[in-house]
């Protein structure tokens, strides 16, 4: 018999979290729904065809903080270029950067590349435990649980923002889901709910429910497989559970200036240094942050470099082309595009033909600056 959640039960606090329904029934309903309605995503198809953990791992890294729609074309491009672990491990850093262009948060791919090289050096054997995955560079709790459960059937439950929201609704928990004290409780609840006989499908089922039905603002309860178990549905309190997230770090306003160097048909770009505040290791334009007009500094640069000396000397004479806005994590950046014509030979500058600039730039932050210049050129032509 299905245990129906009671609309009269008290609202739960963080200390008394427990599932208010029959677990076997809820597990069965959710899994049956998923197996019938799951979306046909490329990594699911490839995994079912090949059984290769590589295709699962790549998808999980790409999906970190990135929406599915943005991941799909890059995922195809990446796997065409690097169809297996060995080809990926043998790639150069530049080839990897090119293959993941457009996804953002590029450090994750540096870690992923390092992990691939580590795995190949150890004989190309995949870890088949949660701890084994967790030990790889760039693999956190969430990714380790996702990959090990999907590819190796490890009974490890995933908890992400979607899962937290679904749990809050099922429990009518009217608390901020990112409250740190809830983290271990969600983990425990997820472990109890997980079906150990099908952990990969089950984890994907909970996430899929959060992504497609139990969405943040308009949950589609009539078609939800857990509607009979759900306390928020019974109490019509979907808008109250969960409460608004705790704001972790207020937005920070940043002023930036990007300097586009032009010399004939070539454009000067830099490789951002490891000390840069933003987009370390990416190819982009010279970037000055929160400039002191007396002493402009390239972001993360050695103050004694000849390019830094040139920048300081020429800064006042650079022309402004336009302004755009860009956000990187909590940083709201107002970026001004400056241009320098025929600068002298400078160290650390790579000259790229104009028609290859778009391809060379990895981050949207730089591409937007390039588009400002393109728009200006078009304006002049008309
Ligand atoms: S019944 Fe509605 S609120 Fe409850 S889990 Fe399903 S979609 Fe979410």
Image (spheres, rainbow, N blue to C red):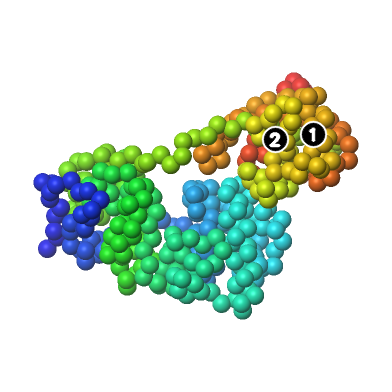
Please determine whether, in this image, residue 116 is positioned above or below residue 306: below
Whether pointer 1 and pointer 2 mark residues with C-beta atoms closer than 8 Å, the reply is yes
Q: Is residue 15 left or right of residue 60?
A: left
Q: Is residue 54 visible?
A: yes
Disc number for residue 288: 2
Question: Which residue shows up at 14% across the image and 55% down it?
Answer: 4
Few, some or many residues within 10 Å of mark 2 (<14, 14–19, 20+): many
User: The C terminus is located in which quarter?
Assistant: top right
Disc number for residue 311: 1
Q: Is residue 353 visible?
A: no
Question: Which residue shows up at 41% across the image and 68% down it?
Answer: 149
Q: Position of residue 44 (x, y in %)?
A: 46, 62
Question: Which residue shows up at 37% across the image and 41% down it?
Answer: 246
Q: Position of residue 208 (x, y in %)?
A: 37, 54
Disc number for residue 297: none
Q: Position of residue 219 (x, y in %)?
A: 30, 43
Q: Is residue 313 left or right of residue 188?
A: right
User: The N terminus is located in which quarter?
Assistant: bottom left
Label 2 residue near ligand 1, CB within 8 Å: no
Label 1 residue near ligand 1, CB within 8 Å: no
Q: Position of residue 119 (x, y in %)?
A: 60, 72
Question: Which residue shows up at 10% across the image and 46% down it?
Answer: 8
Secondary structure, mark 1, is: helix
Please determine whether, in this image, residue 243 is positioned above or below residue 139: above
Q: Total marks drawn?
A: 2
Please determine whether, in this image, residue 249 is positioned above or below residue 340: below
């Amino acid at each position: 018999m299905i245990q129906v959640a009671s609309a009269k039960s008290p609202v739960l606090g963080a200390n008394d979290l427990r599932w208010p329904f029959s677990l076997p029934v809820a597990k069965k309903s959710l899994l049956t729904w998923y197996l019938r309605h799951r979306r046909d995503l490329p990594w699911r198809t490839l995994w079912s065809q090949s059984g290769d953990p590589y295709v699962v791992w790549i998808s999980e890294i790409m999906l970190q903080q990135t929406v599915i729609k943005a991941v799909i074309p890059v995922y195809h491009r990446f796997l065409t270029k690097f169809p297996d672990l060995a080809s990926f491990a043998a790639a150069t850093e530049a080839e990897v950067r090119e293959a993941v262009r457009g996804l953002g948060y590029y450090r994750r791919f540096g870690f992923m590349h390092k992990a691939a090289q580590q795995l190949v050096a150890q004989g190309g054997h995949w870890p088949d435990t949660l701890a084994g995955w967790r030990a790889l560079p760039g693999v956190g709790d969430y990714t380790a649980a996702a990959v090990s459960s999907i590819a190796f059937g490890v009974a490890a439950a995933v908890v992400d923002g979607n899962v937290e929201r679904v749990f809050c609704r099922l429990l009518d928990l009217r608390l901020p889901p990112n409250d740190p004290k809830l983290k271990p409780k969600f983990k425990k609840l997820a472990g109890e709910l997980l079906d150990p006989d099908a952990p990969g499908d089950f984890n994907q089922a909970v996430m899929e429910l959060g992504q497609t039905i139990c969405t943040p603002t308009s949950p589609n309860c009539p078609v939800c497989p857990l509607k009979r178990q759900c306390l928020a549905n019974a109490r019509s309190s979907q808008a109250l559970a969960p409460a608004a997230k705790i704001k972790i770090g207020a937005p920070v306003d940043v002023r930036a200036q990007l300097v586009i160097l032009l010399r004939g048909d070539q454009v000067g770009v830099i490789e951002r240094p490891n000390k840069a505040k933003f987009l370390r290791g990416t190819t982009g334009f010279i970037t000055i942050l929160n400039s002191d007009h007396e002493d402009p500094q390239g972001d993360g640069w050695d103050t004694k470099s000849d390019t830094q000396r040139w920048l300081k000397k020429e800064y006042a004479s650079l022309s402004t082309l336009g302004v755009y806005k860009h956000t990187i994590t909590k940083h709201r950046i107002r970026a001004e595009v400056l241009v320098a014509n025929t600068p002298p030979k400078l160290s650390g500058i790579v000259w790229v033909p104009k028609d290859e600039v778009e391809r060379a730039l990895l981050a949207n932050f730089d591409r937007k600056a390039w588009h400002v210049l393109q728009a200006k050129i078009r304006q002049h032509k008309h």
